Image (tube, grey):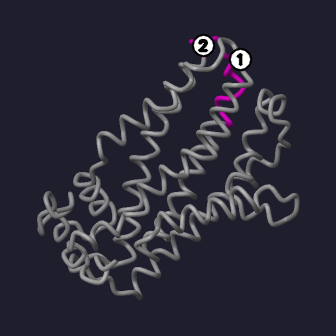
Amino acid sequence: MSATEQNVRASDLEMSPSFIKGWLAMWMFTRMNRWTVLGFLLLIPLMTITIDVGSQSQFIHLVLEFYQRFLLPIYCLTIFGPLIRDEVQSDTIGFLITRPISRAKLVLLKYLVMLVKVQILAFAAATILLLVGVIRGVMVEGLIVPFFISQAVAIFAYGGIATLFGLFSKKYMVLGMIYGGVVEFSLGRIPTNVQLLSMFHHMKGILAHSEPVRDVLHWEAAGFGISAAYTLGAGAIALVLSMLLFTVREYHHADDMQK
């Protein structure tokens, strides 16, 4: 039984036809797994303890190559992928789509609610991470602004893509891994325009505005606005496709539970 089935009463959405009221109602009854929250907050900071004291190079490799390139996309996939799929598998999707909000708005509301929650959690995790870096003697001043901006736009993009994967197939984790391997880790390394398909390529353009990042990883800075626009645009396109897909496609509990 999902959190929606347990907590949302019919009147909560029937009395909330407006977008803002619907969003607030969805916010109240959307929960995140406490172990997921604790793991995200503590995993990387704990790993930071293993780096050499004062080693800015090791810290940057850990933060950018492991956290932002690998862990953050997987986290978004596990959170946003089942956004609607969990409702199908728990057989509560029929309840939600009979409320006085459109299917497209339902996807948008659930996405925006989870987006804000994940952004808050990621901001807290990144803050802890940087504080641990300071404690370990790492100079993080030049990294702060590009790091937080790249993380925020990345969550928007990866969240939208993961939502689309979740609506497209119940095997969204497999789709996400294929996407990561082909687009982010393969095409993103090819020095041609095909790099533009990689979200991390655009994140690198933002992160490279940090002098320590340029010194350690030798990345080239791109236009702040252009890199952010590409990333946000990709997330927005994926979100619109998710809304369209959920509008035209029927989802049934029995079909989804079949192997």
Q: Residue at x 49, y 36 (%)?
A: 123
Where 194 falls versus 63 (above or below)? below
Tell me the number on the disc at residue 7. none
Residue 87 horizontal/vertical position (percent) = 27, 69
The quadrant in which the N terminus is found is bottom left
Identified by mark 1, the residue type is Ser
Furthest-front residue in view? Answer: 259
Tell me the number on the disc at residue 136. 2
Mark 1 Cα shell of 10 Å, populated few (<14), some (14-19), many (≥20): some
Residue 67 horizontal/vertical position (percent) = 59, 39
Q: Residue at x 46, y 32 (%)?
A: 43
Identified by mark 2, the residue type is Arg
The reply to whether discs 1 and 2 touch (Cβ–Cβ < 8 Å) is: yes
Q: Secondary structure at mark 2?
A: loop
Near-viewer residue (46 or 163): 46
Residue range corresponding to the magenta coloring: 134-146
Residue 94 horizontal/vertical position (percent) = 21, 79
Q: Which residue is mark 1?
A: 55
